[in-house]
Amino acid sequence: MRSTGFRRTFVALSICSLVLTASACGSGDDSGSGKTRITVNCMPPKSAKVDRAFFEEDVAAFEKQNPDIDVVAHDAFPCQDPKTFDAKLAGGQMEDVFYTYFTDARHVVDIKQAADLTPYVKELKSYDTIQQQLRDVYTVDGKVYGIPRTGYSMGLIYNRALFEKAGLDPDRPPATWDELRAAAKKIAALGDGTVGYADYSAQNQGGWHFTAELYSQGGDVVSEDGKKATVDTPEGRAVLQNLHDMRWTDDSMGSKQLLVINDVQQMMGSGKLGMYLSAPDNIPILVKEKGGEYEDLALAPMPGGQGTLIGGDGYMFSKKASPAQIRAGLKWLDHMFLTPGDGFLGDYARAKKSDAPVGLPEPRLFTGAADAKDQQVKKANANVPVENYQAFLDGNQDLDMKIEPPHAQQIYSVLDGAVSAVLTKKDADIDGLLKDASAKIDGILARG
């Protein structure tokens, strides 16, 4: 599933529409002026004025430093639309350098629409500084097909004010699902429409969260070889039983169900929700769009102590891109996104001046000296209560970081049904739901 932020504060945005001709999206190697011309996507829209200005400023600086490269950026909504993504690839309408979710990487390679970057990746100055597990996402059969740009991991957002009001210690967030259940019950007992814990259960988002909760229990959605479902297990049963019991026995999840992310964010922003699972990029949305306060919002690692779901995005290159365009595109990625403390995502001083949040606990993209520099600059410009996120940063060090399953969206659609059933039917047959979901996922995996 996608993370919710563009620059971790805005929803991700981009590109050419299917009604455009192929030449409008892709580009020739030569712009007609002796320059190497590349088209790129995921430029913020004009409505995101600050991010748009930053992006254009950074592209202009790159072209000044590289007068032999012409960058043509495209924007639309969203950066990648799953409904049109494959059609754009197949129709030759994709940009030379195009945005992808982590879960797209293998698929784009399998349908032979990605350029092999292996011969050129040594020219990417930052490549060796990026976390190995993130580089591995875009490495297929030993060949490099993409470059990570951001990463996220799931955690538990909670309302410190409600914790205090319910007699809970806001500096000791729940570390297990039993502790979460007990905390949710106390928060819900405050009354006045207060909900202890909320979860998604529609639009594939319920399946996404089921996966995260399964990882937190030490389980997995599919077998290591990717051929069989592994949801009909004690860990899978524990996920559904816990949701069922909080909903029907404890009455700590409220009566309104079939929620999606906007519903839950609204509840948290209004101060009526104690806890929900999310990535760190939800926090500025809760403040800027939903009425929340940074001081009230804190982040803890996933309860359960076993694992957490990670995701993120990066860029791949069109199979039609020339060697010159690949080299130019890699230079552009280094400049825009992969220079610690600088560029579109890393210029924290610039972000702070524009009142964008600095100091959120995003999972670290870099390692070693590059990471140290990035963290140093971020800390120097922090304008949010970083102490509220320390538990998340500390706890994540001990968790198994697991990427989403193959065919994630299809699998999430199946698991949506199981999650929604236990939250809307008191007599839901958990064993039957898991057995049915397992059979359907096996079918998805068999079709490849």
Image (cartoon, grey):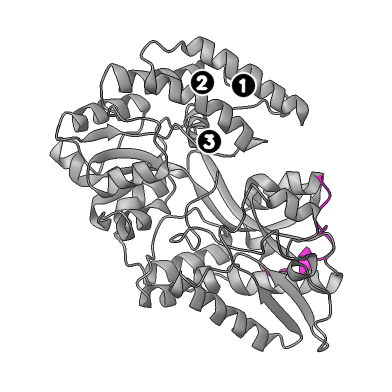
Q: Split into 4 quadrants, where in the image is the N terminus?
A: top right
Residue toward you, 217 or 294: 294
Q: Specify the principal SS of the magenta part.
A: loop
Q: Are marks 2 and 1 in contact (CB under 8 Å)?
A: yes
Residue toward you, 369 or 431: 431
Specify which label sits upstream in the sequence, 3 or 1: 3
Q: Which mark is residue 204?
A: 3
Q: Spatial distance from mark 2 to mark 3, Cα to Cα?
A: 17 Å
Identified by mark 3, the residue type is Asn
Asked which secondary structure carries label 3, the reply is loop
Density class for disc 2 (Cα within 10 Å; few <14, some 14-19, many ≥20) is: many
Stretch in magenta = 111-125
- Whether 434 is drawn above or below 265: the answer is above
Q: Which mark is residue 273?
A: none
Q: Which residue is mark 2?
A: 236
Identified by mark 2, the residue type is Gly
Q: Which mark is residue 230?
A: 1
Specify which label sits upstream in the sequence, 2 or 3: 3
